[in-house]
Amino acid sequence: MHLILGAGCAGLSLACALLDMAVDEQIVLVDRRSTFQHDRTWCFWSTADDLPFASLATHRWPAWRLVDRHGRGTEHRSTRHAYLYLPADRFYEAALTRLDGAANVELRLGERVLDVQAGPEGVSVRTSNGTIEGAIAYDAMGGAGPLNRHRPEGAIELRQRFLGLEVELERPVFDPSTATLMDFRVGDREGDALRFTYVLPLSATRALVEDTSLGGRALDAGDRRAAIGAHLREVWGAGEVHVRREERGALPMTTYEFPLTRGPRLLAVGAAAGALRPSSGYAFVRLQRHVRGVARAVAAGVPPPTHMGLRRHRALDALFLRALSADPAGFDQHLVGLARGVDADVFARFMTDTSSLRDEAVIVAALARPRFLRAMAVGRAERPARARARAASA
């Protein structure tokens, strides 16, 4: 029996992948939620023709832009790699329909995982409804799952926090062909955080607008809603705003290498395996690629993947986070400079872990500016000091 602990994006994607690879053993998914709602959105670039669930995307933007703190925009346009928008309800419906049609799949909702014990012969999972025994278990519960409860000190770690509102305006102000990935015209600029607004126009009058910060303190939800309202009025000239729904989250951006396995009987997928790209927070493409690899390994009876992404990508991510942690509020200059220094296709491939060595050489050249190099050097020097301070306070 395959036990999948968590039935979010990672858990459902893994179950579907196992079915696609003709795995016929019993598959049991356990999740504390009782319903599936439109609680989030996944966005990614279409850099792979065979990406699972990509066909469910409801919007595609051929152009995207970054706007600096002075209102100067840098626009990318690609005929090859559009930016896609996949709402959670579409994904959940498709995945649950696929699983509902499989005789060997059981979905147990409203059940909390309390403990996991893995031995040489199998796995025992204690839940709020009893104990389940299986041959193998997959932690799909995110960074707080059983593989990651006692993470060691020493890694760089920032939080990407956001609150998003899907809004409907009384008059058309948005360009539905262009997504704004980062707009740094934020009134309340904190000294210890990188903060920006993210605008995904779904029509001329409707958009998902998110207030996002990297690092710094956690902001009150009311402050974020007010910032979104101010942005819509001052930047877009919006009149009356109707809020259709809200989503929020906090994502770890860290150099910590999440363990993909804890022995042959306990594996990790999704955020628990480090699917969140450390330098950006994008996860959907990495997640799908990883669960496919795990499912192929299970079907073939071979060991699963041992790393998330390529070593050189992990090195670039660490470089980004080192500089970001040293100078969060000033990092917008590096991001805008990066966008100006590379073309659209290179930017899209880098963000989705599909970049080539040539692409990465262009990325490094665009970042090799004195202020970025100084921030990276400061981040390198501060990292052991932070680790010593945490150890002293423990």
Image (tube, grey):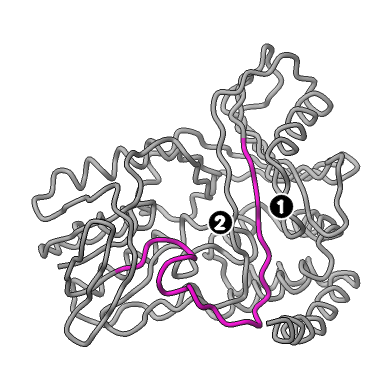
At horizontal 74% and vertical 74% (from top left) the residue drawn is 322
At horizontal 38% and vertical 39% (from top left) the residue drawn is 56
Counting from the top left corner in percent of width and height, residue 215 is at 74, 60
Mark 2 surroundings within 10 Å by alpha-carbon count, few (fewer than 14), some (14 through 19), many (20 or more): many
Counting from the top left corner in percent of width and height, residue 318 is at 67, 75
Position of 308 with respect to 365 (left or right) is: left
Q: Which mark is residue 189?
A: none
The amino acid type found where label 2 is placed reads: Tyr
Mark positioned earlier in the residue sequence (1 or 2) = 1
The amino acid type found where label 1 is placed reads: Ala
Counting from the top left corner in percent of width and height, residue 68 is at 84, 46
Whether residue 249 is situated above or below residue 262 in the rendered picture: above
Q: Which of the image's four quarters has the N terminus?
A: bottom left
> Nearer the viewer's eye, disc 1 or disc 2?
1
Position of 218 with respect to 258 (left or right) is: right
Tell me the SS state at disc 2: loop
Position of 304 with respect to 381 (left or right) is: left
First to last magenta residue range: 138-164
Counting from the top left corner in percent of width and height, residue 103 is at 8, 50
Tell me the SS state at disc 1: loop
Residue located beneath label 1 in the image? 218
Q: Could you say which is closer to the camera, residue 92 or residue 201?
A: 92
Position of 122 with respect to 306 (left or right) is: left
Q: Quadrant location of residue 295?
A: bottom left
Whether residue 342 is situated above or below residue 205 in the rendered picture: below
At horizontal 78% and vertical 55% (from top left) the residue drawn is 194
Q: Could you say which is closer to the camera, residue 249 or residue 295?
A: 249
How many numbered circles does the render carry? 2
Q: Is residue 139 magenta?
A: yes
Whether residue 32 is situated above or below residue 4 in the rendered picture: above
Q: Which mark is residue 282?
A: 2
At horizontal 77% and vertical 66% (from top left) the residue drawn is 324
